[in-house]
Amino acid sequence: MANRSNLTPDVVSGAYDYLFVAGVVDPSAAAIRDHLRSKAPPGSKIGSLGTIQRFLDVLRVQKKAGVPSTLGFKTELPPEILIAFNGAIHAAQIAVKSEYSAERDALMSQVHELNAESEVYDLELSRLTEELTSSLTHTDIVKAQFSSLNNELHECKNQLSAEVESRAALQDVNAELVLQNALLDQRLRATDEQIIQLNQRLESQKAEYLEFERKMLNAIQQAKSSESREREERSTAHRQADLLQVKVEGLEINLSAESTRNAQLLGLLKTHEEQSVRLAASEATNNELRVQIEMLKAEGTRNVRLEQIFQQIPVDRFDHRI
């Protein structure tokens, strides 16, 4: 048989011992198989998990039948006793091995036969699985085709029923259309009459709108003429305000000149008073001085009145801004 595995009870026992020394208390068949796969060269066949489990079961029975080792236990016995004890253990192990050797050989032969049969069964199972998968795939394809054809048949039946129903509906629709056409003609005639009435109303409203537009134009022209009049009045008011401003400025200039003149006159008055004191003896001079003094006083009074009148004029009358 091609690619036959080299799995033997000794190989399984060696892997078991290796894993036990590595710290695994009771290695399983899966752990042994993983260990053998990690140590085997690429492409080699390890063996089935069932075969490893059968070898492992035999190995466990053998280990249970043996005497446990004293390695790893502390003891205070003398060395000669320990040597004798180990010799007894070794003899007991040899006796057990010889006792079960025949049974082990028989079991090993059965295991080899079962291993060969298991491989044959595995191959046959793989072949049957592939055939079953292929047949299931073909069955699924046939079922899918049948389901598609069945769906198409149902669609054809539905389309036929729909076509029959649509033909009956079309006949009903044709009768309804005839009736609707008659009603539509009546509505169109009524609509034509309404359109004529609306046109008449539109002409009437148009004439009213034209009259209203004419009135609006007249009102706008009147408003424009009134606005032009207001502009002229405002312009006249501006001109009057400018003239009044000019007059006020002239009055201010005159008032300033009069104030200067009054100052000069007051100076002259003081001078004349001094001269009058000096020239008290001269009556003619005194009379002239008195006349001048009276004139200066009258002029001063008139200037004071002008200044009072100027102060009474409101300032906002000169502001001609609009």
Image (tube, rainbow, N blue to C red):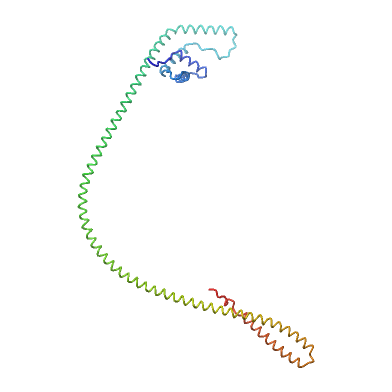
Q: Quadrant of residue 246?
A: bottom right
194 to 141, vertically: above or below: below
Question: In the displayed structure, would residue 179 be above or below residue 227?
Answer: above
Q: Give the side of residue 301 with respect to residue 147, left or right.
A: right
Taking 260 as reference, is 192 above or below it? above
Horizontal relation, residue 279 to residue 200: left or right? right
The quadrant of the rendering that contains the N terminus is top left
42 or 73: nearer the eye?
42
Residue 160 percent coordinates (x, y): 22, 41
- Pick the residue in front: 296 or 239: 239
* Number of numbered discs on residues: 0
| Residue occupying the far bottom of the picture | 284
In this view, the residue in front, 214 or 6, is 214
Which of the pair 78/242 is nearer the observer? Answer: 242
Residue 108 lies, with reference to residue 320, above or below; the image says: above
Res 152 quadrant in image: top left
Is residue 61 rendered to the left or right of residue 264? left
In the rendered image, residue 322, in percent from the top left (x then y), is placed at 53, 73
- Relative image position of residue 263 (x, y in whole percent): 71, 82
